[in-house]
Image: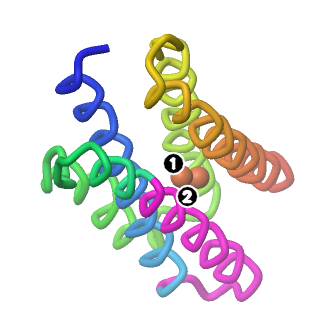
């Protein structure tokens, strides 16, 4: 994969992870359900770890992190975080589930696009796989919560 494409991918994931951090922290702040708020904080801590790990690689590639589009990250993260106390739990679970599903889908696609002849891309695979597993578990948690409402 060309270096600039690799960096674009990494910046996309950095943006997505930071959006999730923003979303979960904002939702936790506005939640009156203690259990949910604590789960959201735990997830936010995982997403921060993901974002940091991706940032490290971008820096290793002699580049700088860049939020793909600050506005995009705000739309994904901050605004739904603000409105979600008013949209009800079912919609919150569904929204978060959708976002986690995008993450799983994109990690999978990125993993498939890696060139295993390149050392840097080969080294990237376990990290992407680990992040993807976390997102998959998050996704299933939101799905389960939503289903248990009905
Ligand atoms: Fe993540
Ligand atoms: Fe996640």
Q: Using the image, determine if residue 49 lies above or below residue 65.
A: below
Whether 29 is among the magenta residues is no
Whether ligand 2 has any atom under 8 Å from the Cβ at mark 2 is answered as no
Whether ligand 2 has any atom under 8 Å from the Cβ at mark 1 is answered as no
Residue found 58% across the figure and 73% down from its top: 45
* Residue 92 appears left or right of 3: right
Whether 52 is among the magenta residues is yes
* Residue 40 appears left or right of 98: right
Determine which quarter of the picture holds residue 120.
top left
Query: Among all residues in the image, which is located at the extreme right?
Result: 148
Q: Distance between the residues labelled 2 and 1?
A: 5 Å
Residue 131 placed where, x, y %? 61, 45
- Tell me the residue that label 2 is attached to: 92
Label 2, residues with CA under 10 Å away: few <14, some 14-19, many ≥20: many
* Residue 149 appears left or right of 123: right
Residue found 38% across the figure and 57% down from its top: 56
Circle 1 sits in a helix, a strand or a loop, which is it? helix
Residue found 36% across the figure and 68% down from its top: 83
Label 1, residues with CA under 10 Å away: few <14, some 14-19, many ≥20: some
Q: Nearer the viewer, residue 60 or 68?
A: 60
Residue 32 placed where, x, y %? 62, 88
Residue found 57% across the figure and 23% down from its top: 108
Look at the image and give the residue range highlighted in magenta: 30-53
Q: Which of 78 and 126 is in front in this view?
A: 126
How many badges with numbers are in the image? 2
Q: In which quarter of the image is the N terminus?
A: top left
- Tell me the residue that label 1 is attached to: 95
Say if mark 2 contacts mark 1, CB within 8 Å.
yes
Q: Residue 55 carries which label?
A: none
Q: Which of 64 and 73 is in front in this view?
A: 64
Predominant secondary structure, magenta span: helix
Residue 57 placed where, x, y %? 38, 48
């Amino acid at each position: 994969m060309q270096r600039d494409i690799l960096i674009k991918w990494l910046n996309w994931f950095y943006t997505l992870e930071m959006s999730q951090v923003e979303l979960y922290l904002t939702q936790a702040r506005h939640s009156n359900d203690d259990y949910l708020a604590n789960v959201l904080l735990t997830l936010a801590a995982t997403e921060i770890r993901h974002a940091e790990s991706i940032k490290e690689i971008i820096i290793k590639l002699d580049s700088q992190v860049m939020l793909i589009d600050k506005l995009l990250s705000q739309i994904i993260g901050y605004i739904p975080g603000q409105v979600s106390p008013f949209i009800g739990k079912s919609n919150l679970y569904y929204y978060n589930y959708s976002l986690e599903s995008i993450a799983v889908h994109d990690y999978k696609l990125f993993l498939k696009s890696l060139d295993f002849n390149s050392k840097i891309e080969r080294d990237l695979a376990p990290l992407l796989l680990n992040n993807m597993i976390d997102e998959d578990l998050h996704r299933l948690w939101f799905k389960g919560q939503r289903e248990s409402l009905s």
